[in-house]
Amino acid sequence: MAAVTTESGAGSGAAGSPEATGGSTGGGGWRRPHGPLQRYYGPSTAEAAEAAPDPTDINGPHFDPEVFMTKVRSECPLGQLLAREAALGREIRALDSDMQTLLYENYNKFISATDTIRKMKVDFRHMEAEMDDLAANMAAISASSARVSAALQDRHRRGAQLAGVQALLRKLQALVEVPGRLRRWAGTEPARALRCHARARAVLRHYRHLPSFRAIEDESHAIMADLAQRLRTRLRCETLDPKELTECVEMLLQLEEPAEELSEEFLSQAGARLEAELAALEAELPTADPSGTASTPPPPASDILDFVDRGSSAFVGTLCQLAGSYRALFGGDTGHLEPFAAALATRYFALLERRLALERGLGDTSLLVRALDRFHRRLRALLELLPAGADAAAALVARAARERVDRYLRALQTFFLGCLGDVRQALAAPRPPGKEGPGLPDLLATLAASVLGQLKAVLAYVQLFTARDVAFASLPYFKGEFCVTAVREGLVVAFVRWLCRTARGFADGPAERGAPAAPPALLLLLARLCLDYENSTISYILTLTDEQFPPQDSGPAVTPGPALCAEARAAAQRLLDHYVQVQGAAVAQMLRKSVETRDWLGTVEPRNVRAVMKRVVEDITAIDVQVGQLFEEGVRRAQSSDSSRRAFSVYSSSRAPGRYAPSYTPSAPMDTHLLSNIQKLFSERIDIFSPVEFNKVSVLTGIIKISLKTLLECVRLRTLGRFGLQQVQVDGHYLQLYLWRFASDERVVQGLLDEVAASAAHRCLDPVPMEHSVVELICERG
Amino acid sequence: ARALTPQTAETDAIRFLVGTQSLRYDNQIHIIDFDDENNIINKNVLLHQVGEIWHISTSPADKGVLATCYNKTSDTKVMTCAAVWRMPKELESGSHESPDDSSSNTQTLELLCHLDNTAHGNMACVMWEPMGDGKKIISLADNNILLWDLQESSAKALLSSSTALEGKGQLKFTSGRWSPHHNCTQIATANDTTVRGWDTRSMRQIYCIENAHGQLVRDLDFNPNKQYYLASCGDDCKVKFWDTRNVTEPVKILEEHSHWVWNVRYNHSHDQLILTGSSDSRVILSNMVSISSEPFGHMVDDDELSDQEDQHQEEKIKEPLQDSVIATYEEHEDSVYAVEWSSADPWLFASLSYDGRLVINRVPRALKYHILL
């Protein structure tokens, strides 16, 4: 039995042990099915155990004296047992006395209740007798009331009849008076006459078989016909303002004139009025001048806001009023109204468009936006009546906006070209010796900053179109399509694309066909610009645009940034390649001329490095400086610390003669071939006009490759004497001394110069090479 | 070696002539026979002792007659001369005996006549009248065009007319071609960046493409089927196609090479096939369908096809319409200075590089069938 306390502990464990539950008496029985649940809800088992009945709790419902006794007996020492017994005895006594008190009180209350019930029974017997009396009296009263009402019934009926007759007589009186009244009001107050007639008409029509009534009816008819006639003439002749017109037609309608005819007449009247207003608007527009004598149209008399204001208050207001009254008059039948209004609205739109077309130039965008806004607001009222016009109006606003955006694009382009022109001028400007002009980086920074600034300004202008307080900004077009198609695609993307295209144009276009080619520095500058665009500016611009013009989710597809970046990169690549080709060609041309014009057979023993080689080195150094201003250094192959590089260069130059020494020995010409062929097998193929990377070293390597390959091909076309060969040797060594540091891989320079030397030896009649030390001496002296 | 030519008059065997360039040894002309069926190359050597060969061309009428431009070197002077030669009879149609020891089997060319150029300068190239009887040749010497009549079975060359290019700048001719059209009365020449057309009857210039290339023009060729079309190549790595009636703009530009293009050749019978050789050591075969004489659309008779088939056919034909590079051959290790189509087999061509390697290639079979079918 001692297991009982531990059982809850076991139950709170993962597995409820069966022997523990078997040991318990009361609690274990109902807890058993909960075992699996408890196991499942692992964490809550502790709580469950707390709520479990405790048979040793003396106040609990599941108290088991046996268990309690056992527990107390087994747990407590004797002193505690005695104290516990005394306490229990006290408690039991107190409970007994409480119980007795309660019992006594309850008994007293029961006795008093029995008394009360007895008294009530006596009183009810009295009340029954009085109720019977009351019923008898009520029956007598109702009988007498019935008698009185039967006596009065006859009188009442006669009175009602008399009242009816009097009402009828009054109506007749009014009818007789109708023609008189009609005649009185017809002249002055046609509306009142109409009301009067309307009231009388039904009755008259009903009683027309009686001669007297017919007379009245005929007379009133005549009067009304007369009135209708008068109204019609008024409708036709006079120029009424819309309100009078409406009244007039309304009255005619009440006179049961044919609605069809009336509506036509109404429309023609309204049309005339609206035409007049349109004509007034048109008068403000300068007439189209087909002859084109006036090249610039005179500035419009009023600004566009004014124009739109006038147009909307006069024309649109009237049209709205008329359309509203038409609808009120002729009900839902709008078959005539719609084409009519549509035609007029179209003309109005056409006028407005002409006026908008006059807004050439970049005037004040905010003014244009406000004008369009007003136009749109005014038109909204009309559009409720005329749903068909909504599209046209929205399209008009959209077109105007689009037009404006296009114009901004053109302005941006012009601006960029202007900037380019400035840059060209700055590059071409002769510089006073000693004073350097603005460097390429400065020019680049100025160009990029001014273009970006302009673009931002334009975006700010365009943003006016989507400002929150502009009504049409909430149109779906302006929310979605305008942002994406017009601004993002049409302005930003188009500008970037155009920029790339223009830049490419410098590389692709005029170079050969005699047109003035772009200066190489400009090519370099543009290449850097495009590269910057690719790296950062495009994403910046696009983010800016997307922030200012949030694109709609379901909007049309946009050009992704990476695509633009790729375009810019391609342009940059093309420009840089072109730069390399142009510079390479310049150097190559110099080399070619120098080789072709010299008499290599009859030349004297070389004393100096040829001037052209010095010039080549100078040019390449200049190019190096130029490129270095804009592009990073780049990585060299075989890169190492400065000192070791020098060591390598010394090594390679000292190794060089050993390497092609065999080619100078005339005894083994076949070996030379074999040797050079084997050498080529192991060296990689060099692409001469290959794309370059965006760094200085790569650019320089490209230029050097082009130059040296040219030298090689030219030497192969010549026949050299002994001194010719030696001159080539000296030149080659000189080039190698000065060019290796520009190239990314010395081996490229080395390989090409080796080939030059080998070819020269091959093309030599008397191949006796110069002593290497002499070559070095000459080069160092030069 | 730079000089390569097909044996023009030979129409059965595939045969090329290669001239060597060596300053220190006797130069040779190698006659290369290619046996298509057995894939065997057969070589015969002729000695050409007068100097290194810069240009070689063969008579269109007589298999045994050829002309070379060669360097004659004295101590302080190099002179390029030209001469007409006859090869030994037994080699005319290729020798089939003793291919093994061909190197020992050297024979000498028989000199027919010199083209006397003492008054005119260095010979750049010699052209035979393409359709003629092998009696007329034109040579370019510095800035002169010389028209020669060969008489007494080529034993004597008479200068029948000549003209000189005058003006300032670089006027030396680099190359020229004789047009097979207009009854062989036109030639085209290249000097510096300019391409010029001449009438051989009046020896007057008939057109001039200024700045045809950004740099030196290296070679030209006439489209064999379209009389006004001309291809040129040059140091700007480009191959350009011209319509000589409109010389302001090229019809088409190819930019595939990465260095100077030295040679351009139209295929003799399928003028959409263009062969170019460049000093980037590559030979490129291009398919220029859009400017060829090949019809674009209906190659098959419409009547023979039902509509459906017809449409299908059109689609199939339109598909390869794009101009494209067919193949790039990279067998050479050094600059390629000459490429030539075989005169006998229109699907075969040879290319020659500086190190003396001659490579014979075929047009890819798939393309061949595509063109034929």
Image: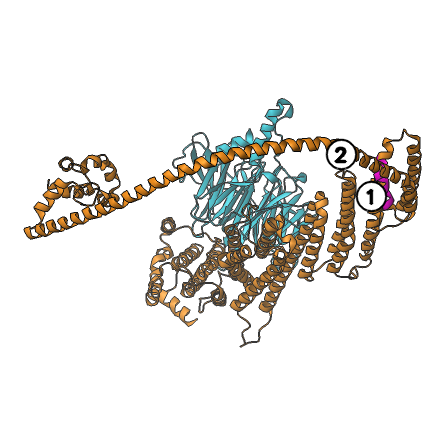
- Chain letter of the cyan region: B
Q: Is residue A588 visible?
A: no
Q: Is residue A772 left or right of residue A500?
A: left
Residue B158, placed above or below residue A706: above
Residue A656 in the image: state x and y as whole percent.
Answer: 36, 60
Report the quarter where the N terminus of chain A lies: top left
What is chain A's hue in the picture? orange
Query: Dot 1 corresponds to which residue?
Result: A250
Residue at mark 1 to residue at mark 2: CA–CA distance:
48 Å
* Chain containing the residue with disc 2: A
Give neighbour class at mark 2: few <14, some 14-19, many 20+ (Cα, 10 Å). few
Q: Is residue B302 visible?
A: yes
Residue A46, placed above or below residue B133: below
Q: Nearer the viewer, residue A2 or B25?
A: A2
Mark carried by residue B65: none
Which amino acid does the dot numbered 2 rest on? His
Residue A455 in the image: state x and y as whole percent.
Answer: 59, 60
Query: Dot 2 corresponds to which residue?
Result: A156
Q: Nearer the viewer, residue A708 or B289?
A: B289
Q: Is tag 1's residue or tag 2's residue first in the polypeptide sequence?
A: 2
What colour scheme has been applied to the protein in the rendered image? by chain
Q: Nearer the viewer, residue B217 or B106?
A: B217
Range shown magenta: A191-202
Residue B147, placed above or below residue A629: above
Please, what secondary structure does the residue beneath circle 2 have? helix
Q: Is residue A625 left or right of residue A244?
A: left
